[in-house]
Image (cartoon, helix red, strand yellow):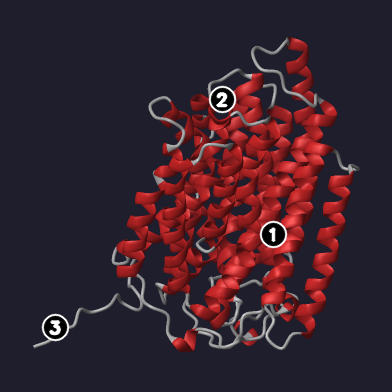
């Protein structure tokens, strides 16, 4: 007699019932996000061990971000064709195996190559984790709560990277910061294999993979992110930066031209005619500009101006994580009470206002900074969750992975812009080289002035970008953004046409 082992449930009735796949997907998302910042704190140690120059050490972290950001759209497109769970399992396996390779690294060049390979594997994980979380539940309110959990986990990984790295370095060698990825990836692989249902053929697209579009998108996004990094490092009129900008522009032009003519485009550009898709992507970029800019600025503030240790500086960022968790009821209430557009506008106002608060409070002590961080996180939490859910829901049912990839790409571009803005303004307004050790009162005063100008500039930039994106959303009071227009008496400008494979509307 043959015994059949039942597969994982197609959908779950609660977060508790879905604890196995949720834990696995959260682990996958956490490890790929924490690797963005984990090695930052270890760069001096790596430099001493491997003898790398300053530029080479910058690429230890930059190589990961470059391949990660450049391949997100390609990975999302492949997942919608080959299967989301299958691509995620490949990504997790690759991430774990590549991480073990750090044991054989003996030069900075080898480490840079390994980090670039890790970025490729992470790109195969990032958009799919959010897409699969979405498909674990039919109920829209559960989807929003699950997405909230994922965003909290992702932000925690990004913020806690330096803190975890600094704490670990007090006890183990720096190689363990990467070696630990292997067992985490293994646990996540098993959880996904056991708890996430396999893709059904009807949930995938039969279009062939658009390889020219993939290559052009990699070139456009990769060169664009590199141009922002190069502008800070080499100057905005240097030959390297100008060449990267021109290359990114040409690749973007060729990508748009190809996608419009292709019978099976990787990214259907007509989707941007939908206000929700366009607005959610723009608003996500705006929030990422704020988050990355503030995190980069405050790392300098705490460790240089205050002279705090890396561990203490990492702990100082905890208001971001705690508020992200505690703000969930408020964000959901805003969405239910006022609808997506108004809720996101409120979030945009909070983010912009908090940046102005930071501009005022940089020289008024940590409590003033912490209060601004709390206000900013409420705004980030509101905009990021609503836009992430709305963007995926506005995509056709067989294109959800490319939707989450678009969401992640917008955030990655925003992160690069935010870091570039802060790095450039600090270099222009304060100094191009931040001296180690105790700073003189004059340098601290100059740094505070530079921060005030920087956060004021960010407030205007983020306020304009995020507000522009939020205005394109609908007035839906749940998380089903592509409901029939007549179901929303005040659908706002540019109501969304129903996408193929729409699911029944469920009130949050």
Tell me: 365 left or right of 261.
left
**Disc 2 or 1, which lies upstream in sequence?**
2
Between tags 1 and 3, which lies in front? 3
- The residues bearing labels 1 and 3 have C-alpha atoms spaced at a distance of 51 Å
Between residues 381 and 343, which one lies in front from this camera angle? 381
Between tags 2 and 3, which lies in front? 2
Residue 298 picture quarter = top right
Mark 3 neighbour density, 10 Å: few (under 14) some (14–19) many (20 or more) = few
On screen, residue 2 above or below 141: below
Instruction: Please say whether residue 396 is visible from this viewpoint.
Output: yes
- The residues bearing labels 2 and 1 have C-alpha atoms spaced at a distance of 41 Å
Q: Residue at x 72, y 23 (%)?
A: 434
Residue 41 in the image, given as x and y percentages of width and height: 55, 31
Residues marked 1 and 3 touching at CB (< 8 Å): no
- The residues bearing labels 2 and 3 have C-alpha atoms spaced at a distance of 58 Å
Q: Residue at x 53, y 71 (%)?
A: 478
Residue 283's mark? 1
Residue 474 picture quarter = bottom right
Instruction: Please say whether residue 472 is visible from this viewpoint.
Output: no
The residue pinned by badge 2 equals 48
Mark 1 neighbour density, 10 Å: few (under 14) some (14–19) many (20 or more) = many
Residue 192's mark? none
Residue 46 in the image, given as x and y percentages of width and height: 55, 31
Residues marked 2 and 3 touching at CB (< 8 Å): no
Q: Secondary structure at mark 2?
A: helix
Residue 3's mark? 3
């Amino acid at each position: 007699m043959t015994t059949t082992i039942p597969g994982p449930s197609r959908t779950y009735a609660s977060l508790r019932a879905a604890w196995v796949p949720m834990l696995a997907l959260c682990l996958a998302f956490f490890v790929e996000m924490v690797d963005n910042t984990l090695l930052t704190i270890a760069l001096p140690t790596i430099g001493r061990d491997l003898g790398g120059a300053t530029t080479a050490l910058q690429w230890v972290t930059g190589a990961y971000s470059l391949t990660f950001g450049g391949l997100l759209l390609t990975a999302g497109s492949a997942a919608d064709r080959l299967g989301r769970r299958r691509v995620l399992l490949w990504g997790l396996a690759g991430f774990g195996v590549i991480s073990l390779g750090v044991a054989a690294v003996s030069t900075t060049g080898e480490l840079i190559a390994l980090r670039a390979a890790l970025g490729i594997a992470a790109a195969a994980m990032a958009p799919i984790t959010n897409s699969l979380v979405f498909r674990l539940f039919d109920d829209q309110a559960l989807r929003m709560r699950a997405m909230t959990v994922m965003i909290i986990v992702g932000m925690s990984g990004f913020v806690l990277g330096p803190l975890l790295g600094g704490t670990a370095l007090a006890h183990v060698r720096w190689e363990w910061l990467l070696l630990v990825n292997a067992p985490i990836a293994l646990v996540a692989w098993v959880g996904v294999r056991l708890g996430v249902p396999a893709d059904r053929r009807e949930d995938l697209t039969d279009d062939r993979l658009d390889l020219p579009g993939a290559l052009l998108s990699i070139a456009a996004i990769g060169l664009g992110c590199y141009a922002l990094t190069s502008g800070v490092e080499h100057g905005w009129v240097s030959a390297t930066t100008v060449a990267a900008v021109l290359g990114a522009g040409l690749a973007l032009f060729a990508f748009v031209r190809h996608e419009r003519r292709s019978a099976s485009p990787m990214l259907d550009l007509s989707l941007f005619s939908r206000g929700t898709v366009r607005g959610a992507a723009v608003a996500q970029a705006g929030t990422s500009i704020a988050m990355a800019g503030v995190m980069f600025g405050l790392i300098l503030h705490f460790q240089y101006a205050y002279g705090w240790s890396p561990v203490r500086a990492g702990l100082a960022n905890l208001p971001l994580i705690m508020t992200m968790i505690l703000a969930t009821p408020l964000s959901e209430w805003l969405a239910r009470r006022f609808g997506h557009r108004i809720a996101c506008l409120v979030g945009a106002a909070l983010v912009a206002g908090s940046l102005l608060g930071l501009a005022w409070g940089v020289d008024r002590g940590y409590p003033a900074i912490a209060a601004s961080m709390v206000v900013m996180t409420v705004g980030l939490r509101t905009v990021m969750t609503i836009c992430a859910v709305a963007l995926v829901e506005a995509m056709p049912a067989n294109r959800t992975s490319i939707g989450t990839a678009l969401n992640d790409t917008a955030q990655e571009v925003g992160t690069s812009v935010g870091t570039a803005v802060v790095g450039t303004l600090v270099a222009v307004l304060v100094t191009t080289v931040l001296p180690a050790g105790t700073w003189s009162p004059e340098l601290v005063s100059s740094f505070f002035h530079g921060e005030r100008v920087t956060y004021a500039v960010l407030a205007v930039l983020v306020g304009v970008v995020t507000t522009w994106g939020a205005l394109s959303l609908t007035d839906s009071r749940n998380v089903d953004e592509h409901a029939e227009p007549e179901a929303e008496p005040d659908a706002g400008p540019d109501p969304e046409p129903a996408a193929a494979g729409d699911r029944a509307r469920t009130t949050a």
